Amino acid sequence: MTTAAASTLADADPLRLYDQTFASRLMLGTARYPSPAVLERAVQRAQPCMLTASLRRHGALGADASHGFWALLQRLGVPVLPNTAGCHSVQEAITTAEMAREVFGTDWIKLELIGDDYTLQPDTLQLPVAADLLIKRGFKVLPYCTDDLVVCQRLLDVGCQAVMPWAAPIGTGLGPVNPHALRTLRERLEVPLIVDAGLGLPSHACQVMEWGFDAVLLNTAVALAQDPVAMAGAFADAVAAGRAAYRAGAIAPQAAAQPSTPVLGTPFWHQS
Ligand SMILES: CC(=O)[C@@H](O)[C@H](O)COP(=O)(O)O
């Protein structure tokens, strides 16, 4: 953490995941940026709490680019959250996680287990199996999952201390396609919930933070924006605004109009 202890751990409202606290509630992916320089500036602007990195992509870059990418991650000084992107089986995910632990020097892992190549929907039946095995091997697992309540409960049953439901399929930018399911998760689960994937606009991020989600993880909406650095900043501001609104306590919407101009002599509303 660099900036004045990151605003005193984001004004004493840190994100708590496993045994660690983080000042920011934004996680950023590192793929698909126009250049490493743009990625670097976007990260500097957004000040995310974690950066995801794919071991498979890292390995596929070739020696020079791979070293360059690793040097960039180290220079940025943001904790790395390796992922198991592209894995389709439990064994593949475990092997990839073990390699990522060595390469990136961290026990954190974003568990991605793809069940359908067209929608990139997670394999929700195998996810708890993989999470269970990874936790037993000492990993801090953040599983990318759907917004299915029972799947999330199973992931918590095997020891995940947070879950990452999607807003929409990866890379679509659709925003929360099933608000009811997401809000049900928030009502029923008392663990950190991170909305991961499918966010397209800062207002999507603000919306889910207003609902009480603890953080968001996104990549495409920033990396493919016309100005990724400005968009990174817009998302960081939106996440902070949504969190502040959640903590401030919103009014309940109601159908009937009520005058907001005080009646003479009763300038303040008070409960009787
Ligand atoms: C980078 C990463 O972890 C992605 O797999 C993640 O799910 C982000 O999705 P979007 O690209 O839709 O934001």
Image (cartoon, rainbow, N blue to C red):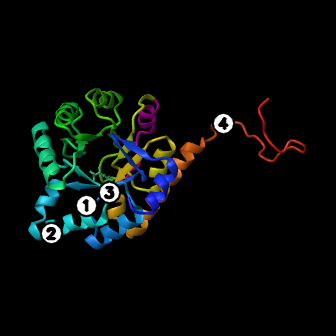
Residue found 77% across the figure and 46% down from its top? 260
Q: Which mark is residue 31?
A: 1
Residue type at the position of mark 1: Ala
Q: Which residue is mark 4?
A: 254
Q: Please indicate whether residue 260 sits to the left or right of residue 80 in the image.
A: right
Of badges 3 and 2, the one in the foreground is 2
Residue type at the position of mark 3: Asn
Of badges 3 and 4, the one in the foreground is 3
Ligand 1 within 8 A of label 3's CB? yes
The image quarter in which residue 214 lies: top left
Q: Disc 3 vs disc 4: Cβ atoms closer than 8 Å?
A: no
Q: Tell me which segment is drawn in magenta.
A: 173-187
Residue type at the position of mark 4: Gln
In which quadrant will I find the N terminus? bottom left
Q: Which mark is residue 44?
A: none
Q: Which mark is residue 65?
A: 2
Of badges 2 and 1, the one in the foreground is 2
In this rendering, the answer to whether 69 lies above or below 264 is below
In this rendering, the answer to whether 23 lies above or below 135 is below
Q: Disc 2 vs disc 4: Cβ atoms closer than 8 Å?
A: no
Q: CA distance from mark 4 to mark 1?
A: 43 Å
Q: Which residue is mark 3?
A: 219
Q: CA distance from mark 2 to mark 4?
A: 56 Å
Tag 1 secondary structure: loop
Q: Nearer the viewer, residue 94 or 1?
A: 1
